[in-house]
Amino acid sequence: MTDSRRGLILINTGPGKGKTTAALGTGLRAVGCGMRVLMLQFLKGSWHYGELDGVTPFGENFILKQLGRGFVKVGGAETDPEDLRMVHAAWDEAREAILSGDWDLVILDEINYAIGYGMLDPEVVRKTLLERPEMVHVILTGRNAHPTLVEIADTVTEMREVKHAYQKGILAQRGIEF
Ligand code: ATP
Ligand code: MG
């Protein structure tokens, strides 16, 4: 064990609930430590999540952006070129933010889905993460994290579903799910 400060790569993955909300919790902790946090949400865009307004009191120290439009077609359906364009634009912004050193913590929310859907090359992501300034922390979220990213990550947590209200037919609840 050493107490020297350094940037970490963290991954929140697995089928259970809590990947995005754990990343937001880490963002809250970090901003409370005087750090600057940027959260970029891949694919999301159609729902107005509570966190979009939840971070506004932190001003420029906690910026959250939705860089998708929701409703991405998967499984057999052709990838819509517009969704692909948005993922690539989101990645360009993420890459620049990570390499800039302007942010202490960069959260790439749902990026694992973009990679899993074949919309983003995991090797490109890996290369940027390895090139980042030493002190920058990065969190990646979404199910089925790619092995090449798990390999270089420092902390990987797999959320396991024990049960979920949805299975009882309970719809997503405001403040808990969105
Ligand atoms: P959260 O945003 O609540 O932390 P998550 O990031 O782990 O969830 P995602 O895979 O991003 O989960 O799913 C997004 C949406 O699906 C959220 O509204 C989330 O609450 C909900 N969800 C997450 N896990 C499950 C599950 N096992 N069954 C049904 N719905 C789920
Ligand atoms: Mg999520």
Image (tube, rainbow, N blue to C red):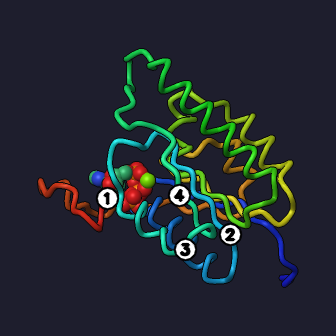
Give the mark, 3 or 2, whose residue is nearer the N terminus. 2
Q: CA distance from mark 2 to mark 4?
A: 11 Å
Element under disc 1: loop
Disc 4 packing (10 Å; few <14; some 14–19; many ≥20): many
* Residues tagged 3 and 2 counted as in contact (Cβ below 8 A): no
Q: Amino acid at mark 2?
A: Arg
Disc 1 packing (10 Å; few <14; some 14–19; many ≥20): few
Give the mark, 1 or 4, whose residue is nearer the N terminus. 4
Q: Does mark 1 have its CB less than 8 Å from ligand 1?
A: yes
> Where does the C terminus fall, quadrant-wise?
bottom left
Q: Amino acid at mark 1?
A: Phe
Q: Amino acid at mark 4?
A: Leu
Q: In the image, what residue occupies the spot 75% across and 34% down? A: 124
Mark 1 vs mark 2, foreground winner is 2
* Residues tagged 3 and 4 counted as in contact (Cβ below 8 A): no
Q: What label sits on residue 36 in the rendered view?
A: 2
- Asked if 151 appears above or below 36 in the picture, the reply is above
The x and y percentages for residue 136 are: 78, 63
Q: What label sits on residue 58 in the rendered view?
A: 3
- Number of on-image labels: 4
Disc 3 packing (10 Å; few <14; some 14–19; many ≥20): some
Q: What label sits on residue 64 in the rendered view?
A: 4
Q: Quadrant of residue 52?
A: bottom left
Q: State the residue in front, 130 or 69.
A: 69
Residue with the mark numbered 1 = 178
Element under disc 4: strand
The x and y percentages for residue 133 are: 86, 58
Does residue 15 appear anywhere in the picture? no
> Where does the N terminus fall, quadrant-wise?
bottom right
